[in-house]
């Protein structure tokens, strides 16, 4: 809330240099802000009485947007990449998939390794678990198992993340 939008009877006022001017009526605070050709901005509306500050509102909004943008830059976004295997996969194919998983892990992504069962393969889920555990064992030097193999519908899923 700025200037005339502030309807409180009393406000705690801080001037443009950061000095506290104490508790006064909102009208007096608005008058002081107008004299300095600045805006009266409600900084902390939940306080008793609300805290208002005399500042240039445009500059305040600009700096706030700049801070938010800076905070967004520092955020670390982790995506999940998937590697699909099948119960009757050959060793060379596993090695190829392993290289893909290594690349994903080195880029800082998490890896979802899944084994898809079709038809009669569903009766032999132990083979899928074995494949997933061998896959994890071969990547043990760069990755940890975050979520152990578990059936989800027709596929068995395991999550891996780079070692800390």
Image (cartoon, rainbow, N blue to C red):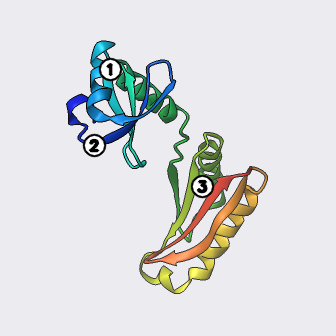
Of labels 3 and 2, earlier in sequence is: 2
Residue for badge 2 = 8
Q: Quadrant of residue 145?
A: bottom right
Q: Closer to the observer: label 3 or label 2?
A: 2
Q: Name the N-terminal-most of marks 1 and 3.
A: 1
Q: Nearer the viewer, residue 80 or 73?
A: 73
Q: Residue furthest left?
A: 4
At x 49%, y 18%, the residue is 17
Q: Position of residue 68 (x, y in %)?
A: 44, 32
Q: Quadrant of the N terminus?
A: top left
Mark 1 or mark 3, which is nearer to you? 1
Report the residue marked by disc 3.
93
Give the side of residue 61 with respect to residue 113, left or right.
left
Looking at this view, is 22 or 152 the one in front? 22
Task: Tell me the residue at 28%/26% (across/down).
Answer: 30
Secondary element under disc 1, as helix, strand or loop, is helix
Q: Which residue is mark 1?
A: 32
Q: Height in image: 139 above or below 133?
A: above
- Residue 115 in percent (x, y) is at 53, 68
Q: Is residue 42 above or below residue 147?
A: above
| Residue 158 screen position, x and y as percent | 59, 66
Relative side of 137 to 118, left or right: right
Image: 146 above or below 96? below
């Amino acid at each position: 809330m700025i200037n005339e939008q502030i309807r409180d009877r009393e406000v705690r006022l801080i001037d443009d240099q950061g000095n506290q001017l104490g508790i006064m009526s909102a009208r007096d605070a608005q008058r002081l802000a107008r004299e300095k050709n600045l805006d009266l901005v409600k900084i902390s509306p939940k306080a008793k009485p609300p805290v208002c500050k005399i500042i240039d509102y445009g500059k305040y909004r600009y700096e706030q947007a700049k801070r938010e943008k800076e905070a967004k830059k520092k955020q670390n976004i982790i995506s999940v990449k998937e590697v699909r295997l099948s119960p009757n996969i050959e060793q060379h194919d596993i090695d190829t998939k392993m290289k893909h998983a290594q690349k994903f892990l080195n880029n800082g992504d998490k890896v979802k390794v899944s084994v898809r069962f079709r038809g009669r393969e569903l009766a032999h889920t132990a083979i899928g678990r074995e494949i997933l555990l061998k896959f994890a064992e071969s990547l043990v030097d760069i990755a940890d198992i975050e979520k152990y193999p578990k059936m989800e519908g027709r596929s068995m899923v395991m999550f891996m993340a780079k070692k800390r």
